[in-house]
């Protein structure tokens, strides 16, 4: 039986931060999290400080600028720690990975966990600025979300990998939240990623420039096409994240 011990977190550089804020980007709807977090890492010059390995992951390595890299990497800048995955997380593996990650977040004394995802909408092509929905297990964070333009969920459900992160966070008494951007159902959505980053700028007092992300949207859609196809296959075996009509 597989357990969280089958997931190994390697720190290639010592991560010693007091009360870090964790931001997660894992491939799912519209690749919103992957696109947003990848842009954040590049634009803000985050440093790679580790990676996550497991025999439960598919046998894949990625190549960027002639460098061979692990597909699930950890980055840091100041008090921010970023988890970026460039491979879809199989639903069965998701249970184990979510448990190991939240255990690690607890060890690091995380102040806040922010998971970035998308919620599909058929009319996305007619929407110039995607709306951002969100929820959290902390009242103060919910208020901060509203102040930052997030529509806080009143009813509904969250499913998939990030639901496991939220569930485990509650059990470990960690502050956790999820941001959901309106996105294309089956295509990479850089515009949705940009909208989430604008919210993060307000929530966390950041200054992430999203202009390049928007300007390169068409190129990014092509670059992320293969990952989107793999992610769509992976998501067929799990229920989709739904946003209800009720929010604050």
Image: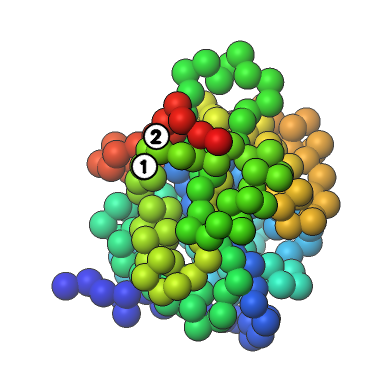
Residue 146, above or below 140:
above
In the displayed structure, does residue 230 sit left or right of residue 140? left
Q: Position of residue 18 (x, y in %)?
A: 67, 82
Q: Residue 157 carries which label?
A: 1
**Please, which residue is most extreme toward the left here?**
1
Q: Do we see residue 101 in this rendering?
A: no
Which residue: 73% across, 64% down?
A: 46
- Dot 2 crowding, Cα within 10 Å, few <14, some 14–19, many 20+: some
Q: Position of residue 93 (x, y in %)?
A: 30, 60
Residue 125, above or below 182:
above
Q: Mark 2 points at which residue?
A: 242
Answer whether labels 1 and 2 touch (C-beta < 8 Å).
Answer: yes
Q: Where is residue 131 in the image (x, y as percent from the top left)?
A: 61, 31
Q: Position of residue 209 (x, y in %)?
A: 82, 45
Which quadrant is home to the C terminus?
top right
Which quadrant is home to the N terminus?
bottom left
Q: Which of 229 and 235 is in front in this view?
A: 235
């Amino acid at each position: 039986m597989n357990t969280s011990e089958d997931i190994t977190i390697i720190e290639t550089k010592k991560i010693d931060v007091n009360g870090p804020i964790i931001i997660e980007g894992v491939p799912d709807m519209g690749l919103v999290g992957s696109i947003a977090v990848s842009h954040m890492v590049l634009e803000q010059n985050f440093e790679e400080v580790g990676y996550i390995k497991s025999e439960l992951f598919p046998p894949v390595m990625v190549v960027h600028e002639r460098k061979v890299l692990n597909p699930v990497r950890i980055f840091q800048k100041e008090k921010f720690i970023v988890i970026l995955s460039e491979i879809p997380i199989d639903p069965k593996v998701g249970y184990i990975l979510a448990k190991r990650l939240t255990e690690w977040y607890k060890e690091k004394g995380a102040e806040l966990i922010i998971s970035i995802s998308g919620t599909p909408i058929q009319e996305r092509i007619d929407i110039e600025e995607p709306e951002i929905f969100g929820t959290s297990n902390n009242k103060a964070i919910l208020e901060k979300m509203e102040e930052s333009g997030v529509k806080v969920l009143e009813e509904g459900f969250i499913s998939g990998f990030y639901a496991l992160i939220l569930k485990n966070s509650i059990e470990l008494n960690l502050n956790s939240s999820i941001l959901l951007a309106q996105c294309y159902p089956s295509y990479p959505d850089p515009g949705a990623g940009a909208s989430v980053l604008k919210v993060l700028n307000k929530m966390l007092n950041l200054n992430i420039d999203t202009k390049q992300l928007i300007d390169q949207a068409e190129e990014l859609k092509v670059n992320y096409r293969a990952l989107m196809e793999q992610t769509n296959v992976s998501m067929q075996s799990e229920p989709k994240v739904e946003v209800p009509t009720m929010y604050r």
